[in-house]
Amino acid sequence: MDKLVVHGGSVLKGAINISGSKNASLPILAAAILTGEDCIIRRVPDVSDTNYMIQILSALGADVERSSGTVRITCADITDEAPYELVRRMRASICVMGPLLARKGRAVISLPGGCVIGDRPVDLHLKGMEALGAKVEFEGGNITLTAPNGLVGAEMDLRGDSGPTVLGTDNVMMAATLAEGITVIESAAAEPEVLDLANFLNSLGAKITGAGTRRIVIEGVKELKGVEHTVIPDRIEAGTFMAAAALAGEGVTLNRVNREHLKAITAAIIKSGHSVEFNEAGDSCFIQRGENPQGVDLTTSPYPGYPTDMQAQMTALLATTPGTSVIKDTIFPQRFMHCAELKRMGADIKIDHGTAIVRGVEQLSAAPVMASDLRASAALVLAALRAKGTTEISRVYHIDRGYEHIDEKLLMLGAKVERVRV
């Protein structure tokens, strides 16, 4: 097991490339199940979540080759049962359900394990599958879905208590590509990752319109073909480095970004007193730490609102920003475990019913801290960059789930970070 050792006080400067999106890669890799032909997917980030998905596809019988950021998948002959030992490690593995059911008429998926940032049920996924005509049964911790006569298009609403479901939208959209007739998803997730999946599916020969909006229409087709596809940039990785540059930077350039996907994050960084400038193409941005940073109020909401996946990193930035900031997470109200660790470093944060009240302090101090989830671990790394002394961050496997070589990228920017095996 590794830990990250971060020596505080470094000044970040220079340029890095942002990796392909983890959250777009996972359903796109799963969608390769829908065709027996070769799919070549580029800019798949080298993170543990994509590695688990590739292992799941291999266990299902897919022929998978990975070279750097390019993955070739051929699902000519696959089984319909996803193995528990792999599925339990990653909640997003549930997105093999839709393509397996559509391709094989049957899918057996282990119920994903619990999630440290709160309850994230799969009921909306199952609601969508049942609307398409699937029969759902539970036994021995497994979900068995069957549609021996194929799936049939239907209209459905996938809104949940905290807004639309991203993976649920992905799952239904994938299943509906091979269903008979037309499927309409109301209250669909509009995230860029959903649109990237739809673009991939359309390249395979699917007929999907409305992706990126709250209403998606899928006209079923008989079969899909192979294709090559390049994954969109990871907006959460980009946002994390934007926050790092605002926290401890002296001019940082991020390449391979998408300006449209970063509007809410960019607005929050600018509102807190820092400078963000994009090039004309919108695929590169320059972040300069402001001379007079100030507290901000933020509320997370579904895209195009401020993302819950950037809540922890912004909390770390605001911990040493003068004034009082109020951060409300409407998506995952329990997602504040990082705050206890930040308080160990001297942060002044009070949590009250899904809201963090952050009073900026002048200086954080190094302390041994423990990552509790993916984005919390990123927040601790950011805080450690500005803290006085050397911070040791345990359970770094959390950060490896979604950040490709984060320590190497920070080193490129001038941070003093080392990975230590314990």
Image (cartoon, grey):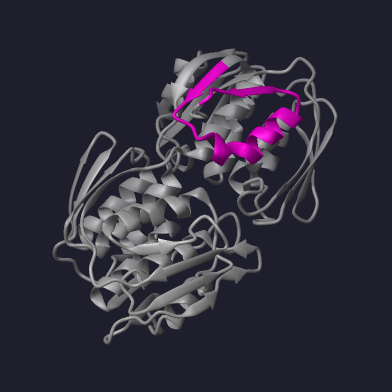
Image: 185 above or below 240: below
- Please say if 10 is above or below 67: above
Picture layout, residue 182 above or below residue 205: below
Side of 409 relative to 272 (left or right): left
Rendered-image quadrant of the C terminus = top left
The x, y position of residue 361, in whole percent, is 80, 26
In this view of the protein, can residue 105 be seen by the observer? yes
User: Does residue 110 show up?
Assistant: no
Residue 78 rendering spot, x and y as whole percentages: 18, 66
Highlighted range, magenta: 252-280
Query: Is residue 91 shown left or right of residue 43?
Result: right
Q: Quadrant of residue 96?
A: bottom left
- The residue at the point 52 percent across, 39 percent down is 235
Name above or below for residue 384 compared with residue 342: above
Of 157 and 104, the residue lying toward us: 157
Q: Residue at x 46, y 68 (%)?
A: 217
Left or right: 318 with respect to 190? right
Residue at point 71%, 28% (across, down)? 270
- Whether residue 68 appears in magenta in the rendering, the answer is no
Q: Position of residue 389 (x, y in %)?
A: 63, 17
- Whether 263 is among the magenta residues is yes
Count the marks: how many?
Answer: 0
Q: Quadrant of the N terminus?
A: top left
Q: Residue furthest right?
A: 323
Residue at (56% x, 39% y) in the render: 260
The spot of residue 376 in percent (x, y) is: 59, 41
